[in-house]
Image (cartoon, rainbow, N blue to C red):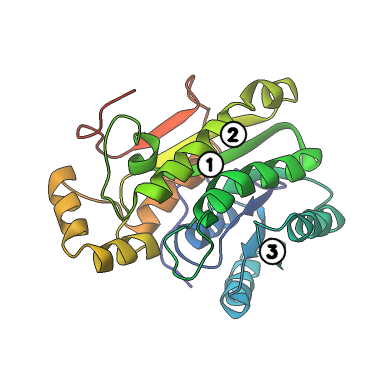
Amino acid sequence: MTETLSPLPESSLSGKTALVTGSSRGIGADTARYLAQAGANVVINYRNKAPRAEKLGTELRELGVQVLVVGADLTDQASVQAMFDEVQRTFGGLDILVLNASGGMESGMAEDYALQLNRDAQVRVLETALPLLGEGSRVVFVTSHQAHFIRTTPTMPEYEPVALSKRAGEDALRERIPALTERGVEFVVVSGDMIEGTITATLLERANPGAISARREDAGRLYNVAEFAAEVALAAHEPVPADHTRLIGDTSSFAAE
């Protein structure tokens, strides 16, 4: 079991249920781990890495919380609906929804796959989850500075389609803030720089050797997976900023809108 402890106070999420999309590995897995360490029951979502997701589920159950491991393709409405039906049967509702899953740099996908996953699927997941989200619940959308600031600060060409699609997803979700607020559902965006050790960073480095080290030099330092996941977990619990945005790490090289 990991030595890294949750940044959240002990038992601060006891009795709550959290779903983290794309949580079989990386930032999603560590976020789920931190939420469980704080007492939350956790839904681990994966697309095609069932054994890895089940292993994490076994680990988190040892903390004394309930864990549901459920596969779903977020670009498929029937799959998403089936996931939330299972969440409702198991827990009756949902208190925290972390929209962590993203992609678009994978090979062999449809040309508009980045938009399908990073915009359309994010909205679909939120809308399908809404009946389960009661007053006082929280939605957290995870993004990158490269996407959040894409309108004012160019990013590396290899990442631009993903950045544009993630910003489109952020915008589409932000449009729903008034309706969410009416229901008593809170919404916050967590944006971080390139994260050391993620699939995206690995693919970017492969496409553009030296890209990550150059970004690290420019930023002073880059967060690793566990460090950034801790910030995502905090965003699920701490008060939401007035602008619904938590910017993690240095942003001096990004121009504000």
Taking the image as shown, residue 228 lies to the left or right of residue 79, namely left
Q: Nearer the viewer, residue 207 or 240?
A: 207
Taking the image as shown, residue 16 lies to the left or right of residue 47, namely right
Name above or below for residue 242 compared with residue 216: above
Helix, strand or loop under label 1: strand
Helix, strand or loop under label 3: loop
> Which residue is disc 3 drawn over?
72
Calculate the distance from the C-alpha at mark 3 to the C-alpha at mark 2.
20 Å
> Which residue is disc 2 drawn over?
173
Q: Nearer the viewer, residue 168 or 136?
A: 168
Calculate the distance from the C-alpha at mark 1 to the C-alpha at mark 3.
18 Å
Measured from the top left, where is residue 254 in percent x and y? 25, 33
Residue type, numbered disc 1: Phe
Sequence order check: which comes first, mark 1 or mark 3?
3
Residue type, numbered disc 2: Leu
Measured from the top left, where is residue 148 in percent x and y? 39, 36
> Which residue is disc 1 drawn over?
141
| Residue 236 appearing in the image | no
Q: Nearer the viewer, residue 238 or 9?
A: 238
Measured from the top left, where is residue 152 in percent x and y? 30, 29
Give the label on residue 182, or none: none
Residue at 50% x, 53% y is 114
Contact flag, marks 1 and 2 (Cβ < 8 Å):
yes
Total numbered circles: 3
Calculate the distance from the C-alpha at mark 1 to the C-alpha at mark 2.
8 Å
| Residue 144 appearing in the image | yes
- Badge 3: few (under 14), some or many (20 or more) residues near its Cα, within 10 Å? many
Residue type, numbered disc 3: Ala
Contact flag, marks 3 and 2 (Cβ < 8 Å):
no
Residue at 71% x, 66% y is 70
